[in-house]
Image: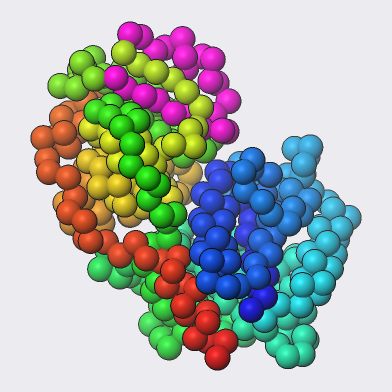
């Protein structure tokens, strides 16, 4: 019942947050979980902290001081990871995303997988991925080869009624028998309260790439039918121009950092405006909130756009594409969403944390 769970976040904190939710559910089901994190520490999420790495461009790894990592750093980090793994000697090795992403971490993940196969008895080796990954047809054969060589099972934390894994990984059919949908992973709804009632809640996850959305939302308020409501803009822990954003806020706009009562406010708000990252979207669906999504599409990123479009096709959200984002287009989308009905409960499977624990227990038997 010991689980060693590896997660690496590079830009935002979504991967770590989802992993922490899943780890909590596993502990609640009786598992002894070691959550090993290779990203920057996040307050309130207890982990076994590895030397932290980041990558704002998802290409070059940077160390704790923001400098490019070298071979010596990689060796230290690999050795720290392997030492922690052998100390735990788990029955389950759970790896978040790889081999369907995190290719830049092969220097430690390939030795980790090799060590798992050398352990006696060998642990169950499981990959944990969100509903959609960043498509990369040129690397699908490589990803499939790594999976077939080293992994026993694949947990896809999504609902196939919304998005099948094949939408972002074309060779998903080759994983038949090992691929298992769990439903979306989300923390339980906290106790009800009146906090944030009838506000417009604007957020951008950790905030590392949300500046344009937050600034545009402040401008859109005056153009919207909800101009008389309080608009609460949450900048996130990684937003680096917080004071500048506050100066843009006029009367009726509150600018704050991320809040621990975010999910409570989602349940009470008149409408949510956010990016389309996994965690925020799932929390919005759980809260039954009316929503406008502005998916992040910087660089070659397409995962958020695909998720937003699929949810919009089901009538669950309204979408403004990032390349058409203006105060006017956002205000118009806010007006459309505010006039629509709230999503009906049960439309999407949100039991992914509990189901993941059930599946691991079944497989260990």
Name which residue lies at 31% across and 13% down: 252
Side of 82 where 102 appears, left or right: left
206 magenta-colored: no
Query: Which quadrant would residue 294 be assigned to in this image?
Result: top left
Name which residue lies at 75% across and 66% down: 108
Query: Which quadrant would residue 111 be assigned to in this image?
Result: bottom right
Q: Position of residue 309 (x, y in %)?
A: 26, 52
Query: Which quadrant would residue 346 be assigned to in this image?
Result: bottom left
Q: Position of residue 229 (x, y in %)?
A: 24, 20
Q: Which residues are magenta?
A: 230-251
Quadrant containing the C terminus is bottom right
Side of 135 where 16 appears, left or right: right
Side of 245 where 198 appears, left or right: left
231 magenta-colored: yes
Q: How many marks?
A: 0
Q: Position of residue 154 (x, y in %)?
A: 49, 77
137, 123: nearer the viewer: 123
Name which residue lies at 64% across and 79% down: 1
Residue 35 in sight from this viewpoint: yes
């Amino acid at each position: 019942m010991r689980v060693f769970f590896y997660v690496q976040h590079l830009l935002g904190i979504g991967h770590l947050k989802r992993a922490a939710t899943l780890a909590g559910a596993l502990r609640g089901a009786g598992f002894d979980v070691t959550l090993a994190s290779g990203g920057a520490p996040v307050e309130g999420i207890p982990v076994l902290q590895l030397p932290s790495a980041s990558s704002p461009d998802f290409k070059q790894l940077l160390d704790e001081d923001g400098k490019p990592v070298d071979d010596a750093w990689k060796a230290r980090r690999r050795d720290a990871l392997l030492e922690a793994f052998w100390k735990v000697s788990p029955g389950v090795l759970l790896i978040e995303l790889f081999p369907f992403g995190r290719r830049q971490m092969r220097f430690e993940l390939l030795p980790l997988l090799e060590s798992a196969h050398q352990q006696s008895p060998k642990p169950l080796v499981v990959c944990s991925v969100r509903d959609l990954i960043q498509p990369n047809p040129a690397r699908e054969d490589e990803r499939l080869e790594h999976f077939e060589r080293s992994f026993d099972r694949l947990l896809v934390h999504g609902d196939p009624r919304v998005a099948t894994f094949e939408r972002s990984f074309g060779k998903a059919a080759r994983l038949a028998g090992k691929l298992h949908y769990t439903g979306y992973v989300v923390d339980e709804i906290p106790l009800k309260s009146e906090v944030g009632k009838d506000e417009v809640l604007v957020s951008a996850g950790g905030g590392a790439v949300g500046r344009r959305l937050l600034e545009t939302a402040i401008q859109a308020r005056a153009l919207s039918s909800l101009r008389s409501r309080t608009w609460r803009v949450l900048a996130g822990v990684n937003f680096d121009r917080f004071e500048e954003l506050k100066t843009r806020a006029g009367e009726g706009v509150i600018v704050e950092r991320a809040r621990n009562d975010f999910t409570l406010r989602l349940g009470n708000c008149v409408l949510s405006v956010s990016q389309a990252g996994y965690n925020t979207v799932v929390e919005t669906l759980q809260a039954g909130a009316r929503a406008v999504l502005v998916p992040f599409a910087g660089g070659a990123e397409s995962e958020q756009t695909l998720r937003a479009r699929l949810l919009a096709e089901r009538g669950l959200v309204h979408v403004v594409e990032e390349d058409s984002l203006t105060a006017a287009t956002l205000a118009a989308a806010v007006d459309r969403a505010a006039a629509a009905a709230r999503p009906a409960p049960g439309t999407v499977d949100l039991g992914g944390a509990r189901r993941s624990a059930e599946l691991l227990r079944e497989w260990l038997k």
